[in-house]
Amino acid sequence: MIASRTVNRKWLFAVSAIAVLWMPQIGFAQANKQARATLFSLQEAFVSIAEEVEPAVVTITAQKTTRIGSNRKEDDGVIPDLPFGRPSGPRSFRSQGTGSGVIISSDGWILTNDHVVGGADRVTVKLIDGREFQGTVRRDFRSDLALVKVEGATFPSAKLGDSDKVKIGQWAIAIGSPYRYEGSFSVGVISSLARKQLISERGGQGRLYPNMIQTDAAINPGNSGGPLVNIEGEVVAINTAIESETGGSVGIGFAIPINSAKFVIEQLKSKGKVSYGYLGIDPDTVGPRLAATYKVSYGALVRQEPDPASPAGKAGLQVEDVIISVNEKAVKNETDLRTTVSRIAPGTQVKVAFVRNGVTKVAAVTLGEMPDLSPAIKEAPKTAAGLGIEVVAITADAASKVNLTEMSEGVLIKSIADAASASESEFTKGDLILQINSTPTPNVAAFQKATQAIMAGDVVRVRWIGKRGTMVVKRVALITVD
């Protein structure tokens, strides 16, 4: 009996030891499983946001006609044996840019950046499902925001959030078409708030962005105008700019808060323009070092003597006054002052509280309207009617180059207007046009008849033949008419 008890005790001790050795491994496996479940849940959240928001994010293509100088030499691609002289005088050409946008209502209102569509002759909106629509633009240069309106369907739309609730460290998701890669989805966090930026466009006028959200979510050229989204799938900002020496993302991107955009959206929808309240001063934030000097806790400092003709000048505000409230709403810094005043209708009388030499005073100020900063947009030169193609009868030499046996099979392209719809097509002067849509064009009269009824928005099929190197090609070009 004693021996048996000894064996049992040893066996129990061995089992206990094995259990102790296994317990940490079991705990680790459970923790590992829980960690993976957390990651999987987060992954599913991102997937659901993509599925919900991406259908409302669009690619915007903006075409612009630019006028250039006179007496420009012909392009290198001109066929030398054509008996037509070189054109003289001013010429124009088309440029094209791509950005992003977000549909904010099911009836086709799209929010984007003004620098994406400003000055464009033609704006095309492409949905993620491939559908394309022509848009009309309402723009506001100062805010760098614009609305594009499209018609013809009920559209998926995104929810607008509250950018005042955004905090540093929260998830941030940028969606758009960087480098024309449609529907790109990148994830980061909110890096900072209330970033003030003065950004000048290349060769153009600068814009002041007084209150931008900074994020490290990848923003690249083409993301402009697209949404910055929170973890709830709500748009909290519009991606606008990056800090970069290379032109690509280095993890420092800036977006316009959606609450700032809401003010612009409302006015652009209702009256096609944005009217900003105007005080007429250049403010600066009173930081901790200046607060004691001016005997205040916070405020916006008047850095320059106001123009006597400005609203501030008429009300008696002076340099070194510190504005602490407008209509009893606290002004903590210059951004508060700019935002508060700009969102009050011009002509409204407001109470401006300020501190002068340690004494608080109140002035009644009738706000003016902010001067328009929009650069003048030159009207694009008019191009030839229809496709903008000038044709002549086929010459024997032109026919032989493409092995045509009959001289009455088509017409010879003499010229294509630089800014015309057909200027972006693959055919060029010296090629032969055989057919417009389903109508043969054996002569100039037939070509003119086939093109005279073409309307803006039509998609025209042009069957043509030409020589490329040693090869004769016969193709069809699809042209969307402006």
Image: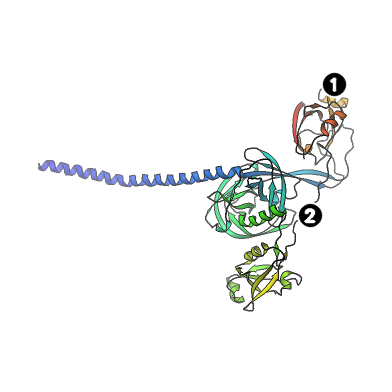
**Residue 196 x/y as whole percent:** 63, 61
Neighbour tally class for label 2: few under 14, some 14-19, many 20 plus, Cα within 10 Å: few
Kindly state the secondary structure of the residue where label 2 is placed. loop
Kindly state the secondary structure of the residue where label 1 is placed. loop
Name the image quarter holding the C terminus: top right
C-alpha distance separating marks 2 and 1: 52 Å
Q: Is residue 413 visible?
A: yes
* Residue 179, image quadrant: top right
Q: Earlier in the sequence, mark 2 or mark 1?
A: 2
Label 1 amino acid?
Answer: Glu
Of 202 and 417, nearer the camera is 417
The relative height of residue 229 versus residue 336 in the rendered view (above or below) is: above
**Residue 263 x/y as whole percent:** 65, 57
* Residue 277, image quadrant: bottom right
Q: Residue visible at 29% across and 45% down? A: 21
Question: Mark 1 highlights which residue?
Answer: 406
Question: Mark 2 highlights which residue?
Answer: 376
Of 185 and 365, nearer the camera is 365
Q: Is residue 140 visible?
A: no
Of 268 and 32, nearer the camera is 268
Neighbour tally class for label 1: few under 14, some 14-19, many 20 plus, Cα within 10 Å: few
Label 2 amino acid?
Answer: Ala
Determine whether label 2 and label 1 are within 8 Å by CB: no
